[in-house]
Amino acid sequence: MKAIFDDRQWRHDPKHFMANGKVLPSPEQPARIEKLQSGARAAGCTLQGVGDAGMGPIAAVHTPEYLVFLKNIYTRWQRIPDAGAEVIPNIHPANRSDSYPRSAVGQAGYHQADTACPIGEGTWEAAYWSAQAAVTGADLLGAGDRAAYALSRPPGHHAYADLAGGFCFLNNSAIAAERLRARGLRPAILDVDVHHGNGTQGIFYDRDDVLTVSLHADPVRFYPFFWGHEQERGTGRGTGCNLNIPLARGTGDEAYLEALDPALERIAAFGADVVVVALGLDAFEGDPFQGLAITTPGFGRIGAAIAGLGLPTLFVQEGGYLCDELGENLTAVLTGFEGA
């Protein structure tokens, strides 16, 4: 299996994070890259660089208004007298149909859902190449590879078409799925991150040409709180093409694998001919977010279960934060998949 990464993805180095009223260091640290690269190598992956497919695949998912904002906001922010080192919103519209302001502060509030997605000097460049890693992975599958791993960092599944959030700026998994769909394939996205892939759901919610499935800690008391509930099934043509499987906090291997069965059944019923796995490793029992309790061997079993679909599969890195076992958990998923 090929693993895809570009060194420019190191350049996003967020400092700000707020949880429970406290300002803390961001968990989405560049050091994640080292552990994930080690895990990919241990799984036998061949590391390769990223192709540049340009803005087209990104703009197929995100609005041009939002992309102009992401590309330019850091420079604009620095022109504000006494501005902080990172773009962090402090005001938000009541809804997406409210007026679109001209000011950098107002646009930050419009395009950043929370304080977990600060934008620094290297954020746009890193996010762009993170998305291109996912596009390169999709193109490998389109060219006949049976599986690939995109080390996409920063992650993407909380990003909507015009809204960053939860460490995410460009929705790498959605971009990859849309790239595959444009090739005439029928993609399903399976999100196994501990957090619901709310941005991915939002992008495809009224569509029936991409299936979205997410297993995650129950958002009734867990981020992203407002999305990821069972009753969210899609709308319009997309009704029935979105499946959420919220799990009790602390769910372990056996219950998780049992819940995975209907997710895989839905993918098969959709007639998918390719799968994009939004690969969050933060469901691990030792992850800092402590949402679920999957073990390292459990990740291997999850990989094997996904392989049971018998479909070309692109793994796109989402969450999974700094702990000693982060690389080992990636190795377990990939070797479990390939071994099956």
Image (spheres, helix red, strand yellow):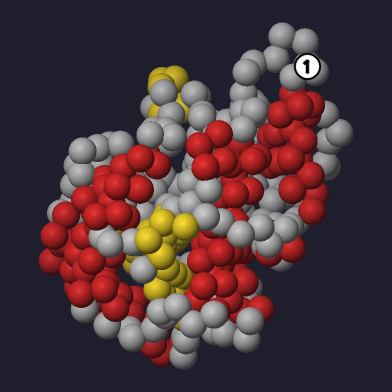
Q: Quadrant of the N terminus?
A: bottom left
Residue 182 as seen in the image, left or right of residue 171: right
In the rendered image, residue 142, in percent from the top left (x then y), is placed at 55, 79
- Residue 1 showing in the rendered view: yes
Find residue 87 and report its image quarter. Answer: top right
In the rendered image, residue 79, in percent from the top left (x then y), is placed at 80, 18
Residue drawn at x 66%, y 78% as measured from the top left: 182
Residue 48 as seen in the image, left or right of residue 252: right
Residue drawn at x 65%, y 40% as measured from the top left: 124
In the rendered image, residue 168, in percent from the top left (x then y), is placed at 54, 45
Q: Nearer the viewer, residue 237 or 42?
A: 42
Q: Nearer the viewer, residue 194 or 319?
A: 319
Residue drawn at x 61%, y 79% as measured from the top left: 181
Q: Nearer the viewer, residue 123 or 205?
A: 123
Residue at label 1?
80
At mark 1, the secondary structure is loop
Find residue 299 and report its image quarter. Answer: bottom left
Q: Quadrant of the C terminus?
A: bottom left
In the rendered image, residue 285, in percent from the top left (x then y), is placed at 18, 47
Q: Indicate the amino acid at tag 1.
A: Ile
Is 272 above or below relative to 215?
A: below
